[in-house]
Structure formats: C-alpha cells, structure tokens
Image (cartoon, rainbow, N blue to C red):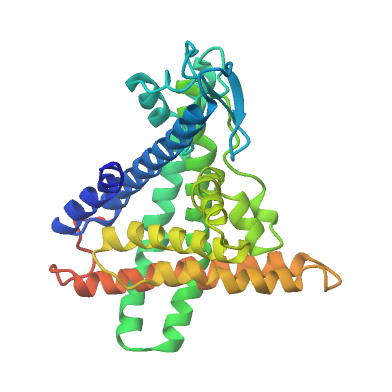
Amino acid sequence: LRALVVFSTLAVPLALCSAAPPRPVSHAITLLGACTAMMKLLSYAHTNAELRRKYITTGAQTKLRRIQSSNDDLDAVAGEGEIAQPNAYPANLRLGDAMRFMAFPTLIYQTRYPRTRRIRSAWLLKRCGELFLVVSAMLLITTQFVHPTVQRSYESINNKDAWSFVERLLALAIPSLFVWVLMFVALFELWLSILAELTRFGDRQFYKDWWNAQKFDEYWRLWNLPVHNWLVRHVFFPCLNLGLNKMAATLVVFFVSAALHEVLVSGPCHVARLYAFAGMMGQVPLIALTNALHGRLPSNRLGNVLFWVVFCVVGQPMALMLYFHDTVQSSSAGAKGSFGGEL
C-alpha cells in the first residue's frame, strides 16, 4: 500500500497528461512537480522505516541517543520505554513534520535540518527580481532563436537531409546552451534559494562547480546535489546492502535516473522514443572513457572539453530536435507549432 501511494503520485499525473492534448511545457512542469513529490515520499517512507527498525532494536533500556544514518546525518531515536524528544522517532510522525519536509528544498528526509533565524525580506525581494529577469531572458532566447531553429529542423529530419540536419544542430547549440544555463541559474541559484529563505532552510548548497568537471562522473556528482544525494541515499547504498558491487550499483543508479528522465520528457511530448533514456545510459561509457583519459595526458582539460562538446552539440540540441519531430508527427493536430501554442 505504501509503495502504491508513493508511485501513484507520479503515475496519476502521467496518466492525466497522456490523456490530455499534448502541451509539453505545462505538462513537463506538472510531471516535474509530481516526480519531486514521489521522490520526497519515498525518502520519507524509507528513512522512517529504517528509524523504526533502529527504534525496535534499541529496546526499553537504552537512553535517547543519536544514531548515525547512512547519509551522515544524526537522527535521534527514542527508546521504547522513554519519552521521545520533539524531533525523535516516533514523535516525528506528525502531519506538520511531513508538510515541512515537502516544503523544504531537499529530497532527503531527516528528523532535523539546519534552520535560519529569520526571513530576510530585502534579500528575498532581490532574488525574486533576479528570477523574473532570468526567466524573461530565457523566454526571449527560446522564442527568438531556439523555436524557429527547431521548427526548421523538422523538414531536415523528414527529408533525411544530413547536411541540413547538422547545420540546424550547430545553429541550435549555442542558444540551447544559453537557455539551459539560464534554466540552471533560475532553478538552482534563485528558485531553490527563494524557497529555502521562505522556509528558513539552512542548507543552501544545491550545486558545486560542475562547469569545471574533468570527468563525466564529476559532472553528475556536482551539478544537481539534491537529486545526486537522493540517488546515493535511496538507490546506491541499498544496492550495496543487497550485495551488489559498486559498478553494478552505479548502473542501477543510472538506470533509475534514465527512466525518470525519459518519463519527464516523453510524458509531456506524448511519445516514447527512449532518446533521453539512451542519452543517460550512454553516460556510463563516457564516464569510463574520461576516467581512462584522466591523468594519462599532459593536461586533464581534455575531459572538460569532451564534456562541453557532448553537452552542447551532441546532447541537448539533438534530443530537442528529435523529440520535436516525433511529437509533431504523433500529434493529432498534425501541424507544426500546435500543442496549445507551447511549441
């Protein structure tokens, strides 16, 4: 029942989006929110299940103590015969505690988090203004450069014109990169910080310097810390506990990540072409390649160059063109630029 509730938070919105006319932008936002809720609920259930096992094995004679969890957070567990403190299991099993976790900009449940003393109104207003400017710039680049180029690529793919396809791909590389970087700033630098300020959430490290990554595994560890930490805590470590080696556990992590990426892209587009899935699973050999090159050449910058070339040219622009083409073909509208005006 618990698993059914958790996965239905994504399955139900996915089914509703699939039944509605394709609106890629609004459906992508909907499914992103649903996926976030699913990951939070899974973390809440998984962590409390572990705390319950520790609570039972602690026994009535033990005193209140902090137990080191697998994500290096100290979670308090009260003994069966003692009065639990406000943040200790099972006193944390309250609706208010769960709702606070759902509002916090984190995907991993803990019984306590670092908190700030107050909300800085001036700082918050400044960040909201910056968010408005960044989103406006992102929409401007999308409408003026990305959208027209993607529309012109439809005929190139239909006519199997390789040279025209490469031309559109290169023309799309820089604008799509700008849009992606602006999206990153809007989400990780501004929106999550705004949410953290509103909830007085103290941990504001949502990313590290991924742009300097010399290996592909460094990039995936640095660019999206909330998702990375969730995958490590709730996928990688459980796989190790089941007896899998690190390589097998890493493959499981990328498989889960690839499946979620495919749902978030294919669901709004109403197509299932597995481009996003293949792109994510293709990171595994690229990780092996950059790890092999790292330290064997006079400069380790080659891995960083390879990352940016794959990321800017082969990755996002190609996926964008292919998904647009297939979405147009599969749409009942049967004409480019339909989909409720979102493409």
Going by the image, does 124 lie left or right of 8? Answer: right
Q: Looking at the picture, how far across and down is residue 243, in whole percent?
A: 56, 59
* Residue at (49, 16) in percent of width and height: 121
* Residue at (31, 63) in percent of width and height: 266
Q: Looking at the picture, how far across and down is residue 25, in whole percent?
A: 30, 52
**Quadrant hosting residue 218:** bottom right
Residue 170 vertical position relative to residue 202 in the rendered view, above or below: below
* Residue at (46, 36) in percent of width and height: 47
Q: Looking at the picture, how far across and down is residue 186, in whole percent?
A: 48, 41
Residue 149 vertical position relative to residue 23 in the rendered view, above or below: below
- Give the mark count: 0
Quarter of the picture holding the N terminus? top left
Name the one closer to the observer, 136 or 37.
Answer: 37
Q: Looking at the picture, how far across and down is residue 152, in whole percent?
A: 34, 74
Residue 343 in view, yes or no: no
Name the one closer to the observer, 331 or 230.
Answer: 230
Name the one closer to the observer, 198 or 41.
Answer: 41
Going by the image, does 207 lie left or right of 14? Answer: right
Residue 48 in view, yes or no: yes
Quarter of the picture holding the C terminus? bottom left
Going by the image, does 229 lie left or right of 15? Answer: right
